[in-house]
Amino acid sequence: MTSSFPASTVLGYPRIGPHRELKRALEAYWEGRSSWEELEDAGRRLRADTWRRLAELGLGAVPSGTFSFYDHVLDTAVLLGAVPDRYHAITEQHAYFAMARGTDTTPPLRMTKWFDTNYHYIVPEIGPDVRFGLAPDKILGEIRQARELGLETRPVLVGPVTFLLLAEAAADAPPGFAPLDRLDEVVEVYASLLGVLAAEGVGWVQLDEPALVADRTEAELAAVTSTYGRLGSLTERPALFVASYFGPLGEALPVLAATPVEAVGVDLVRGGTRGLETLAGKTVVAGVVSGRDVWRTDRERALATLLAVREHADHVVVGTSCSLLHVPYDVERETDLDPALRRRLAFAEQKVAEVVELAGLLAATPAAPTPDDGPAAADPATAGPGPAPAPVRSPYEVRAAAQAAHLRLPVLPVTTIGSFPQTGELRRARAAVAAGELDEAAYETLVRAEIERVVALQERLGLDVLVHGEPERNDMVQYFAEQLDGFAVTRHGWVQSYGSRCTRPPILYGDVRRQEPITVRWTRYAQSLTSKPVKGMLTGPVTIVAWSFARDDLPLRDVVVQVADAVRDEVRDLEAAGVSVIQVDEPALRELMPLRRRDQDAYLRWAVDAYRRATSGAGDRTQIHTHLCYSDADEILAAIDALDADVTSIESARSGGRILGEPAVRRFGRGLGAGVYDIHSPRVPAAEEVEESLRAATRALPAGRVWVNPDCGLKTRTYDQVEAALANVVRAARRLREEL
Ligand code: GLN
Ligand code: ZN
C-alpha cells in the first residue's frame, strides 16, 4: 500500500492567484458579471498554473485540494455533508456562497481567525441532526485535473479531529452537546472517502490536524487515537500523512505516534526536535521552511535540524512549517524594494525552491552524529526584562465624568468603526499617484471631497460621534507602515484574508520610528466640517505588528514596544489638535495569542502594556476607544478591560448577540460598543434586529455604558448598503432611547 513519500513537499500553496485572479473572478461572479462556468474556468486555470509551477521548481510531492473558492474549512464541511438545513433550499453552487456570505434572507455561517493567523475560516455548524454524507466531487475533480496535466497529487483535507474542534454547536443543539460528540460518524465519512481515493489510485492523503498543537484534553487526545486507529485499520486506503503546524505537538506527539498513520508533519520553525524519536518507523515531514514569515531560511540551521530528525525517523521529507497560504507568491516581482532587503526575503516561490534545495543537501549529507535537540525556536514570550510599565491614567469613573461633561452625548451614542466604503475612484487615484500619473495635490483634493461626503452623510443619518472615513488609507496597517521608518511595503505581496479579500502585509525589517504626524490633518479637516465630535483613528501597536511580517532578530515584544511609542506620539498630536475622541484599534490582540495556555498570560501582559503605553498619555477628557473584531473577544475580555480604553467595540452581530449574554460582558467595567451590524455580509439588518441586539446589550450592562456601532469598518461595503444599514441602526438606537 505505502509508496514512499518523495523527498520534498509543501503543506499548501496560495490560491488567490499571483495577480489576484481568483479575487477578480469571484467578484465578477458575485456581481453577476460572469457565469458559474467562467468562475470554474478561472479556478481550473489557477490550479493548473500552481501545479505546473511547483513541478517546474522541482518539488517532489505536489498537493491538491488546497485550492478553494472561498475557504478550505467550508470545503471540508461540504465534503462531509455538514451543511445546516437552512441552506438546503438553496441550489448547490449558491448554497456554498450563501454559507460563506449569506443571502438577503439567510445569514452566513460565522467566520473567525484560523489559529494565530490573519486568515479567516468559515465556522462549520454541527448539531445532533446534521446528516453527514460524502460529497467527494471537488477533491476527485482536482486529482483528475492534475492527472490530465501528467501530475500525481496528494489531496489535502482538514482532518476529522480539527474539523470538529473548529466547528461550533448549532444554535438548536441541546445543552452540553459538542460537535466532537459526532466524531464516530464523521470518521466513517472519512473512511468512505479513503476508500474512494484508494479506488482512484491515490497514494497519499494529507489530513491537517493543526488543532493538536494547542492544549487538548484527555478526551480530545483519545479522539485522535480512535480516529487514526480506525482510519489506519482500513485495508483499502492511501497512505496517511497527518500534518500538524503552528507549534509543537507536545503531548499529542506520542498519541499520534502510536497510531498506524504512515507520516507525521511537524513544525520545526516553532517547535524543536525533542521527542521526535517517538516517530521512529514513520515518515517525518520536517517543516523547516517557515510558511509564516518572508525571511530566507537559514540553510545551515535548517540542515542541522533535518539531520537531527534523520537520527530518529525512518524517512525524512523536507517541507514547510505550514501551508504557504500565508505568504505572497513571488519576491522577484518586487522590483521597487531595496535590493539589500530583497535578498533577505523569500515568498512562496522562493520557499519552494528552498525546500527543494534542502532536500538535495540532506540527501547529499551522510549520516553523522548530531546534537540531540535542534536549535530551539525563539520564544517571544520569554524575552528579557522589558520596558518600564506604562503610566496609569486617572480611574475610569473620573475620566468618564470628565468626558461626559465635555462631549455631551446622548445615551446609546451611535458611531462607526472608522472606515467608510472605499470608492473605485479613490483606489484608482491612489494607483495613479503610485504610477506618477496623478499629482499629490489632485489626490488630496479627492480625499478631502470624500471626507466632506462622509461627514455630511453621518450628519444626515444622525450619528453622534463621527469619523473621517479613512479614505486616505489603502489599509489600516499598510498606511501607517508607509509613514513609519523601519517598514517596507510591497507592490504585489497579497495574502488571502478571507474569500476574495486580501491584504498586503508590510515588512517590518528595522527599528520603527515616526518622523512626523500621520493622521492629524485629515481628522482636523473632518472636525472643521461639523460641530459633532470627530473620532481620530489609529491602529494599535499589536495589530500593526501582527499584520506585518515582523523582523525575527528581536523578541516580538520589543518590536511592539517600538511601534507603541510611535502611536503614542500620534495620540499626543491628535489631542493637541483638539481631537477629543481617539480610537486605537487592536483587532489582532486575540490573534497573536499563543496557542498554549502556559504562554498566554505573559503575552497578554506585554500586549496590554504596549497598548497602554500607546494610549496612556491622553488626558482625562480625551476619550480613548478601541475596537476588536470577532466574538471570541469573550475569551479575553479581562485583558480587554485591562487595556483601560474608555470604550471598546466588539463584534456581536454574526453570533446573534450571543456574546452579550456572557458573564464576562457583565463584569466589563467600561463603555462597550455592541457590534449590531455584520459588515462582512452585504445584507442590510432590519431596525428590529438591531434593536434586539441592543436590548441584549442593555440587559448585560448599564445603558449609560452601551455604545451602538457596526461590528467592523465599512470599507468593504457599498454606500447603498451602508446608508440603509446605518439608517436602521440609528432608528433602533433612537427607539430604545425613548424607553430608557
Ligand atoms: N478602523 C478600521 C476600519 O474601520 C478597523 C478595521 C478592523 O478592525 N479590521 O476599517
Ligand atoms: Zn474590526
Image: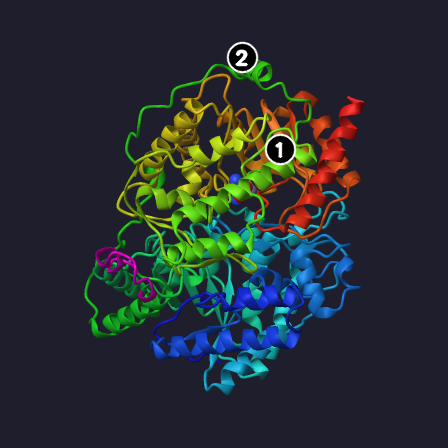
Element under disc 2? helix
User: In the rendered image of this protein, does residue 16 appear above or below residue 701?
Assistant: below
Q: Where is residue 591 in the image (x, y as percent from the top left)?
A: 48, 44
Could you tell me how many numbered marks the image carries? 2
Front one among 734 and 94? 734
Q: Residue 109 carries which label?
A: none
Q: What residue type is labelled 2?
A: Val
Q: Earlier in the sequence, mark 1 or mark 2?
A: 2
Is residue 333 in the magenta section? yes
In this picture the colour scheme is rainbow
Near mark 1 (Cα within 10 A), the count class, few <14, some 14-19 or many ≥20, is many
Point 58% across, 29% down: residue: 530
The stretch of residues the image draws in magenta is: 332-345
Q: Residue at x 43, y 36 (%)?
A: 519
Is disc 1 in contact with disc 2, using a CB cutoff of under 8 Å? no
The residue that disc 2 covers is 398
Q: Give the camera-side residue of 395 and 529.
A: 529
Q: What element carries label 1?
A: loop
Q: How far apart are marks 1 and 2 (CA)?
A: 23 Å
How far from the left and from the top, in percent, is residue 511?
Answer: 27, 40
The residue closer to the viewer here, 729 or 9, is 729
The quadrant holding residue 321 is: bottom left
What kind of residue is marked 1? Answer: Thr
Nearest the camera: 582 or 126?
A: 582
Residue at image point 29% right, 49% down: 376
Instruction: Describe residue 381's horizontal placement relative to residue 683 as left or right.
Output: left
Could you say which disc has been placed on residue 415 in the image? 1
Instruction: Kindly tell me whether residue 655 is visible in this rendering.
Output: no
